[in-house]
Amino acid sequence: MLLNVQDVEIAYGRIKVLWGISLYVGDSEIVALVGANGAGKSTLIKGIMGLVPLQRGSITFSDHDVSKKPPWEKAKMGIAYIPEGGRVFPDLTVEENLMLTANLRKETLNVKAQLDLIYSLFPVLKERGFQKAGTLSGGERQMLAIGRALMSKPKLLLIDEVSMGLMPKLVTEVFETLKSLKAYGISMLITEQNVPEALAISDRGYVLENGRISLGGQADELLKSERVKTSFLGL
Ligand code: ATP
């Protein structure tokens, strides 16, 4: 098991937003975390990355207890985080954005090989390598955010609302790209409000409702479940 989250609880000040969260992500697995606005998806992703502290519970990554490790240590261990809206540095070029992440691990990484891999996955980033990231379209920016995360050669990608603000055609394209990353041995935990599309590319999923996991299972079974149909698919 790559990531194991056990009984995690998170609060902002005195306001608790997550209760008793347990989930896992296996090797080369895509796991979707779905739920309505405010259910706590972003908070959980931030908690796993170490951007917000856990009030209780534990997180192991590759059998190491990382519950209290800061984000930079988790990044070095192979966890990459793509925040909502896939932030990039707008005044740097596409290639500079990519190199920035790679430089953090340049002692252990074949930077050129990694850059070539990303350009082969996202040819549009190669075409636009010398363009300022701030001038990219929404879809291109999201690809750059994913590309940047991949530059560190992570084992696990934590992706928050990758489809946010993208037109439907691009959502499908970005999801298909994520699915293709499995072939490189990369696991993913993705949060999404776009439930059917997210579950369609996922192996398993969890439904988060009001800070608690209400349902979990194989993605195709979740898609067929009455709860998911009525809550998220408008059926
Ligand atoms: P969305 O899809 O709308 O981003 P979400 O499922 O990701 O929703 P979170 O952003 O994790 O949900 O928010 C969960 C709850 O925590 C919400 O009630 C939110 O108002 C609250 N919350 C989030 N961030 C903070 C913060 N920094 N301080 C206080 N409360 C917060």
Image: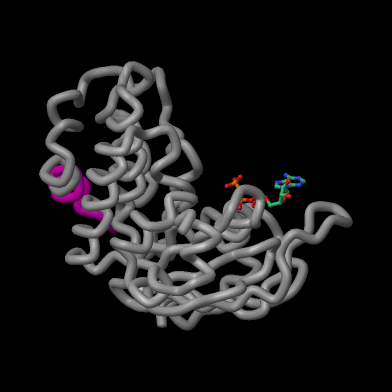
Q: Position of residue 11 (x, y in %)?
A: 78, 59
| Quadrant in which residue 186 is drawn | bottom left
> Does residue 234 appear in the picture of this structure?
yes
Q: Residue at coordinates 33% horizontally, 42% vertically from top-left?
A: 148
Position in image of residue 216 (x %, y %) = 50, 77
Describe the colour scheme in one phrase: one colour
| Residues drawn in magenta | 108-116
Give whichever of 181, 132 is nearer the camera.
181
- Residue 142 sits in which quadrant? top left
Q: Please identify the quadrant where the N terminus is shown.
A: bottom left
The magenta stretch spans residue 114: yes
Q: What residue lies at 35% left-to-right and 51% top-to-bottom?
A: 105
- The foreground one among 110 and 221 is 221
Q: Is residue 135 above or below residue 121?
A: above
Q: Position of residue 96 (x, y in %)?
A: 30, 29
Identity of the residue drawn at 50% across and 70% down: 206
Give the main secondary structure, helix, strand or loop, of the magenta stretch: helix
Tell which residue pokes out farthest to the right in this image: 14
Is 53 within the magenta?
A: no
